[in-house]
Amino acid sequence: MARLSLNGLQTVITSYVDASKISVETFSVTRDNIIGLLDKVGKIYTIDTDVYDKLPELDGELLSFGKIVEEWQLDMTLPVDYDADSDGTKALANYAPSARPVSYSYSLGKKIFPTSIPYNNIERAVHFEPQFIEIVTKITKKLEDSVAAWKYGLKRELLGKAMAQVEAVYSGATTYTQNSTVLAAGTYYKNGSGDFALCVKSEAAAVNKSFAELVAAGQLIPMLMKHEVALPVDDTTGEAFIQAVKEEVEKAKDISEGKSFNGNVLGVEEGLVLYVKQGVNPVLETKTLSGAFHLEQMGMGVEAKAIKDFGSYAGDGYAILMDSRAVRLFQDYNGTFQQENGFGARMNYFRHLEFTGHISRNAFIVIFVPAP
């Protein structure tokens, strides 16, 4: 008998564990018994993972009637001086409130998730009824998993679209030139100093005012929806990012302006959420000076989530802090139907889904991008 050695043991193990017999996709018939019967499958199993939508806070309500989302927002008003108003003209004047431009979101259309369960088919592949029931149950469960993955993907895509729209505010801004620019309400402008602003009051002729004077007069609202801070890769950049987030949270918790697409004045909001692309949190947890990324240090009422990606978004942004109402996936329709196919001997199941995605023009949004 050969004496055991580690090298010899490894040689025997290598020879014994034959890769051609492990996890192959073809079944080889064997009759390795004295009777000559077919060798049976001894174990049938599956590894199942639950798939769920990580962003339930972005669910909108069911739109039972009508599929279009219409968003409106009234402006705040300035006070006027008090006087006796003896002739009553001020009392009878029209103080109609002003509103920001209305926006609309339309249905994204209907999708159908189909699946089939054949009759007298699975039975031949299992040993007993519990195995059969498990397989049938898994078929219907995977239908639900598919829906969850679909919704999660739609929400990440909406977040990415919101980030792309923020970047478009800056990349598409019109250069303001004093004495030659005619201001148009709803247009984003920029000056030579890297400042960006939204016009909320038009001018019929070229304006003889500086960019700063227009901001001071309230005709231009500074746009502050993009915060430049390096992508966290070490303790220094990690601490800088945490500080940047805290700065924005502090602003969001107070009255603020220029943090929405309409540039409107926003009040104190409690439903803040920070979404970061995968890869950011591990750096913060292991390389920042604080030793961990404590969510409770981010500010009261703010929640942080790491998500796979921002859909097809290909910009520089790696995180977005927003009012959780800023992005919504409204459910237009959700119905499940079944249809028996007698000729094909199967039951078909169809899950019908329709959604309207919405990005608010009036809610707090700030994205974090590396400095150019």
Image: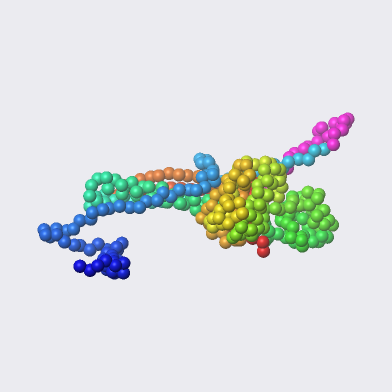
Q: Is residue 62 visible?
A: yes
In percent of the image, x 81 and y 36: which residue is there? 93
Q: Looking at the image, which residue is at 85% across and 36% down?
A: 81
Left or right, residue 194 beside residue 237 = right
Q: Main secondary structure of the magenta part?
A: loop
Camera sees residue 369:
no
Q: Which residues are magenta?
A: 81-102
Q: Residue 53, how many percent across, how many down? A: 48, 48
- Colour approach in the figure: rainbow
Q: Is residue 354 or residue 235 the one in the foreground?
A: 235
Is 198 placed left or right of 46 in the picture?
right
Magenta highlight on residue 98? yes
- Between 336 and 360, the one nearer to me in the picture: 360
Residue ranking furthest to the left: 35
Task: Decide: is 13 above or below 307.
Answer: below
Q: Residue at x 55, y 55 (%)?
A: 286
Establish if 182 lies above or below 100.
below
**At 33% from the left edge and 52% from the top edge, which residue is drawn?**
46
Pick the residue in front: 166 or 114. Answer: 166
Decide whether residue 253 is among the magenta residues: no
- Is 285 situated left or right of 47 in this image? right
In this rendering, would 102 be left or right of 84? left
Q: Percent position (x, y) of residue 107?
A: 53, 49
Quadrant of residue 13 within the rendered picture: bottom left
**Percent position (x, y) of residue 331?**
50, 45
Which quadrant is home to the N terminus?
bottom left
Q: Position of residue 198 (x, y in %)?
A: 72, 53
